[in-house]
Image (cartoon, coloured by chain):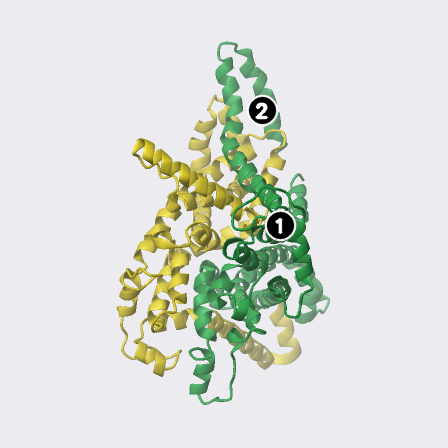
Amino acid sequence: MSAVTSPARQASSGVSATTINRIVIYGLLALFALFYLMPLFVMLVTSFKTMDEIQNGNMLALPQSPTIAPWFKAWGETCVGLTCAGIKGYFWNSIKMVVPAVLISTLLGALNGYVLTKWRFRGHTLVFAMMLFACFIPFQSVLLPMATILGSIGRFGASLQNATGFNFGLGNSTVNLAFVHVVYGLGFTTLFFRNYYEAFPTELVKAAQVDGASFFQIFRRIMLPNSMPIFVVTVIYQFTNIWNDFLFASAYAGTGDVMPMTVALNNVVNTSTGVVEYNVNMAAAMIAALPTLIVYVVAGRYFVRGLMAGAVKG
Amino acid sequence: MSTVAETQIKLTPEHDARPGASVRSRLQDLLPKIVLAPSFAATIVFVYGFILWTIYLSFTNSKTFPSYDITGARAYQRLWRWTFESDPPSSWYTSITNMGIFGFLYILICLALGLFLAILLDQKIRGEGMLRPIYLYPMALSFIVTGVAWKWFLDPGLGLEQTLHQWGWTSFHFDWIKNKDFVIYTVVIAGVWQASGFIMAMFLAGLRGIDGEIMKAAQIDGATTFQLYRRIVIPLLRPVFLSAFIVLAHLAIKSYDLVVALTSGGPGGSAWLPSNFMYEFTFKRNEMAVGSASAVIMLMTLTAIIVPYLYSELREKPR
């Protein structure tokens, strides 16, 4: 665009105006870069400072005597509510919840997308529309019934365990949350795969059908090998969403040692007993942010594509 | 895509022609539906069924535990009364007023800033590949982390105010986060910080999709850069505006975590949004019916925005 713009401008107002323009543009861009980076920078430097330095120094100053003690303390010692064993347990809670939830919802989404594009039936648009709308509901409108159901499943699981002596995982908070995230993530994963497979040549599927390939054979041999990009997009999208979730986590696993990372972090930061250790809080926040940040740094393109696909249907 | 339907029609009689394999082929024909069924059933039960359940509860007088005797629209009547109770403001009044302020400013600033940054970035910028991820990374963080970071940054005793005091600007005063009248604006700041980079990316993608020929033609007609953007580019970006608006409106209505992490609800609940109201009334104040009614109102608001949008999006498909 500017390639078109600049010659005209140069002719009318001279080279210096263009130069000033460029300087202003770069200056503004740099300023906004600072705005976006500032909170992360402050969080990062604070997490490496001693409490002394935080109380007497400047928030933007680099640590005088950098220490990683706050990180160790956040990981292994800091108090979450009444237990003081750090956030590591909650970090693993999140991992144990995220991995199955992402895998199951992604796989189901792939199958749904495959059916909704290559094996259409009467009313497929309505089915898709109903699943799509589910992405957008405020989860407050299902929060309470789900809590009730999870409660009864838990009681059922407990009596089953009494009867059989075997724990089926019913009522386990991590299982509950993984289940909830699969259910309410299905709309998005289906949307992603449906839109991706929509553009996939139907002729290939047709040809395989004529050759006698079955439903699953076509999926495994033809669709899956060509679905790598959308798998990456969907997995990243689901991972980020589920890892970052707070509403479901606080409603269904809001206390005790079953909390996921986001709830634990909120508890660490809002614990008001004793001296507030800001450096430990910031280290804990960084630890909570790292998994999604790493994914973002490694696969940012796919992350953005996922966001876009979630925003712009069609 | 109509070809798929045709294929199936053609294939089905072929299967039926072989009587021995009829059960198997019938199964094969049903298989796609069987595969889709669990997901669809889950959606019906856990989304639509649960919504009906919530609506039902909102017409009972459930307190701490659900009660299933319909007692009429009392919860809605209370919300309606609270809607106008501004002195002292009821927490519902505060929540919906905050929703108005937050929603309006959040959407407006994100759109303006996103478009502005996208236009700047579209001027053949060296280092665009480095700047874009910097603008966008907040979207990868959880609202809780964002809240923690901004809580620190906006804290008068620790953050910005303190820093500027140390630099010699001692009269600088910025305590919005502790001020019940201004705390909602800090939620706007943190919210804009988080989402505006993404809106920028949406606009940038839109800008890159504009046909260069149109621009060239306008240039030849002597349009200035400003005119070019105002008269041609921005009107062409209409679909992006719509998508961005939907994304932002949806994020705004769902906002819950940010208020909790950034303000812990603000002094006396002054930073509440309807989502916080719902959570507090349902789970902490033992007013389940009122909580459910507020959830229904949130849902209806979102439905009013989303359904027309989805309808137009899905209807456009068959070209």
Which amino acid type corresponds to the residue marked 2 in the rendered image?
A: Gln
Q: Residue at x 61, y 40 (%)?
A: A129
Tell me the CA gap for discs 2 and 1.
Answer: 42 Å
Visible residue check, residue B132: yes
Q: Which residue is mark 2?
A: B8
Q: On the image, which quarter does residue B184 sit in?
A: bottom right
Q: Nearer the viewer, residue B188 or A309?
A: B188
Q: Secondary structure at mark 1?
A: helix
**Mark 2 and mark 1 on one chain:** yes
Residue A180 position (above or below residue A307): above
Disc 2 to disc 1: CB gap under 8 Å: no
Which amino acid type corresponds to the residue marked 1 in the rendered image?
A: Val
Q: On the image, which quarter does residue B270 sit in?
A: bottom right
- Chain letter behind tag 2: B
Question: Percent from the top left, x then y, of residue A38?
Answer: 44, 72
Q: Is residue B218 left or right of residue A173?
A: right
* Disc sitting over residue B94 in the figure: none
Q: Residue at x 43, y 68 (%)?
A: B149
Question: Percent from the top left, x then y, of residue B83?
Answer: 67, 61
Q: Colour of chain B?
A: green
Q: Colour of chain A?
A: yellow
Quadrant containing the N terminus of chain B in the rendered view: top right
Visible residue check, residue A131: no
- Chain letter behind tag 1: B
Residue B4 position (above or below residue B115): above
Q: Which residue is mark 1?
A: B296
Quadrant containing the C terminus of chain B in the rendered view: top right
Q: Nearer the viewer, residue B78 or A142?
A: B78
Question: Percent from the top left, x then y, of residue B119?
Answer: 59, 66
Q: Nearer the viewer, residue A182 or A251?
A: A251
Residue B40 position (above or below residue B172): above
